[in-house]
């Protein structure tokens, strides 16, 4: 019994201090023997006079990435979110069909920052108002903690980081909120899983008519983006690999329909992937209806407007409908945007450093925000003045090239334009504008420079609302906060064309690492950097390795791999628990 107690204590001590076993071994020979002395090495901490209060709203990809990478102890961090965990949302479609368990893709947020040197506190509550002028955030306790939902408190901040994600966008379609399932949260995935099994159980009852069974077993998915496509593929595998053996009498009545208003599904992917996905779904028996815009959802029917057939309206009976198209703005974010003069926008506008426009101490990242990239054409005069050091009124190629690095860093659309036009450098662009073969002799006045750069801003693009973007934004912002004081003294960003000196930090730059579209049957489409497209079983194993490695902790990595292994051996869990 004593040995068990000792092992329990040892195990507990190791879990609490596994990254802090810093022992100094001092061996001193005394009369042919050995003396061992152990002590923990502790570095003297610098005296911190005043900590800045950082309030983080949300526990999604952006905020979790920020918390993981923040290591400057000169901040006092307060996290406010209605959920006390981080969820690996790309695996939510797998949760809907029992391929992965919900517990395997969530990590308690306190586990993420409990061993950090930064002082981080967490409150399970939701923000309902931001007062940017007085630097206050108004919060309400979660209903789980307070049944009346009336307990409110106010948090002051020096810096505010808004990373609350987005709501589902129903486009004001009647009946969607009342009758459709969504797939944004863990609870949504669990509810879908229970509903799928309930549909099979209801259809299996002896007194249900054949037509009613067909309706109950008709699963409609609205939205042909990555989430809708992956859920349709996962559901197809679940039905054909597991449920058909458990419900042999009704297996031929199951139907899956994917509704998409655009001409093709997976519109953001390479056309080769789109064509392959549509062909595979049709071979698998998944009914892909493109050009079908949902206009109404009732309790048992979906009404669609067929855009390809002159706007003809059709009704489709269904047993379960999943709405997976578009994102919307949260109500308190709308109020905040009105407060700061951004009422007409769909998301909070930030600059290239993720600062909310008009609020120097407020940052927004993830799905709730969009970067408002500065246009080159707005700053032509400032760029010309900065480059024309001798005030000659004209620019040579050499003078322009001296500021070219700062221009490319501040305005990334310039580099994209040169690449798309297959130009080697800015000299080629200036030559095209001037029509001069001798590049070094080119001299442009300001009007000619405007002409040369007139089409550059056409390359500006909005970043997609993906976990990959949000995660990179959180890492970038943490790096900025870690080096805030250092960069105040020694700015490392590009030239301030509309002011003196340099910007403190380099602007945020998104690096696309590729995207996946699981298509079922152990086949996945992958679109990777360099316009490389891979489709098939090899891409599925790449998907497994990437999604396992991107888990936020070793615990979730082990659980996800364990779930996949269990599914290969025993199949998916078909209980409704």
Image: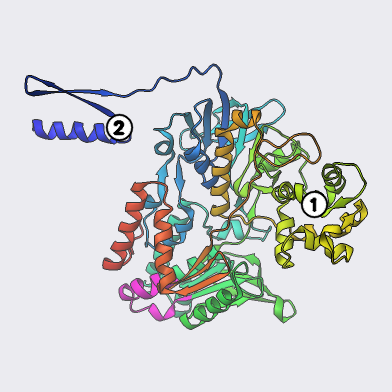
The answer to whether residue 47 is magenta is: no
Residue 267, position in %: x, y? 62, 69
Q: Can residue 194 be seen in this view?
A: no
Q: Is residue 554 above or below residue 45?
A: below
Residue 501, position in %: x, y? 75, 34
Q: In this view, does 447 lie above or below 119?
A: below
Q: In which quarter of the image is residue 305?
A: bottom right
Q: Nearer the viewer, residue 454 or 73?
A: 454
Chain part drawn in magenta: 235-255
Q: In which quarter of the image is residue 29?
A: top left
How many residues crowd mark 1 within 10 Å: few (<14), some (14–19), many (20+)? some
Q: What element carries label 1?
A: helix
Q: In this view, does 536 lie above or below 194?
A: below
Q: Which residue is drawn at 42% across and 67% down?
A: 199
Say the numbered circle drawn on residue 398: 1
Q: Which residue lies under the disc numbered 2?
A: 17
Q: Nearer the viewer, residue 410 or 34?
A: 34
């Amino acid at each position: 019994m004593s040995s068990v107690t000792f092992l329990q204590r040892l195990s507990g001590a190791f879990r609490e201090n596994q990254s802090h076993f810093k022992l100094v071994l001092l061996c001193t020979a005394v009369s042919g023997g050995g003396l061992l002395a152990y002590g923990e090495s502790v570095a003297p901490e610098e005296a911190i006079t005043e900590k800045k209060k950082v309030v983080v709203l949300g526990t999604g990809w952006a905020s979790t990435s920020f918390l993981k990478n923040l290591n400057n102890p000169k901040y006092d961090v307060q996290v406010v979110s209605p959920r006390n965990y981080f969820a690996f949302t790309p695996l939510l479609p797998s949760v809907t069909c029992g391929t992965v368990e919900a517990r395997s893709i969530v990590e308690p947020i306190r586990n993420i920052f409990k061993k950090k040197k930064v002082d981080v506190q967490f409150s399970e509550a939701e923000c309902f108002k931001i007062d940017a002028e007085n630097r206050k955030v108004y919060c309400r306790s979660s209903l789980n903690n307070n049944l009346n939902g009336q307990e409110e408190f106010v948090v002051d901040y020096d810096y505010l980081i808004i990373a609350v994600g987005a709501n589902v966008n129903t486009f004001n379609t009647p009946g969607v909120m009342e009758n459709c399932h969504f797939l944004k949260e863990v609870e949504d995935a669990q509810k879908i899983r229970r509903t799928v099994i309930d549909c099979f159980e209801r259809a299996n009852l002896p007194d249900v008519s054949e037509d009613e069974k067909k309706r109950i077993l008709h699963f409609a998915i609205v939205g042909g983006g990555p989430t809708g496509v992956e859920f349709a593929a996962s559901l197809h595998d679940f039905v054909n690999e597991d449920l058909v053996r458990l419900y042999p009498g009704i297996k031929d009545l199951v139907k899956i329909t994917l509704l998409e208003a655009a001409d093709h599904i997976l519109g953001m992917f390479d056309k080769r992937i789109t064509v392959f996905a549509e062909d595979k779904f049709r071979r698998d028996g998944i009914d892909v209806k493109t050009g079908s815009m949902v206009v109404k959802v009732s309790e048992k029917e979906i009404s669609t407007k067929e855009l390809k057939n002159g706007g003809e309206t059709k009704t489709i009976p269904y047993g379960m409908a999943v709405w997976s198209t578009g994102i919307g703005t949260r109500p308190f974010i709308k109020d905040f945007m009105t407060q700061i003069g951004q009422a007409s926008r769909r998301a909070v506008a930030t600059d290239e450093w993720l600062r909310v426009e008009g609020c120097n101490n407020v940052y927004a990242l993830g799905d709730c925000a969009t970067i408002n990239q500065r246009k080159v054409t707005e700053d032509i005069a400032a760029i010309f003045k900065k480059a024309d050091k001798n005030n000659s009124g004209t620019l040579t190629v050499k003078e322009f090239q001296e500021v070219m690095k700062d221009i490319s860093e501040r305005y990334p659309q310039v580099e994209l334009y040169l690449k798309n036009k297959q130009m080697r450098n800015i000299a080629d662009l200036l030559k095209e504008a001037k029509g001069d073969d001798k590049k070094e002799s080119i001299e442009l006045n300001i009007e000619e420079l405007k002409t040369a750069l007139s089409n550059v801003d056409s390359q500006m693009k909005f970043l997609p609302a993906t976990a990959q973007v949000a995660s990179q934004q959180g890492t970038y912002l943490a790096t900025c906060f870690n080096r805030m004081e250092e960069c105040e003294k020694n700015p490392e960003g590009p030239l301030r064309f509309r002011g003196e000196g340099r910007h403190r930090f380099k602007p945020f730059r998104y690096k696309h690492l590729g995207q996946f579209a699981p298509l079922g049957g152990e086949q996945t489409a992958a679109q990777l950097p360099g316009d490389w497209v891979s489709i098939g079983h090899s891409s599925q194993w790449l998907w497994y390795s990437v999604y396992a490695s991107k888990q936020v902790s070793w615990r979730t990595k082990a659980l996800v791999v364990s779930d996949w292994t269990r599914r290969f051996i025993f199949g998916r869990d078909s209980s409704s628990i």
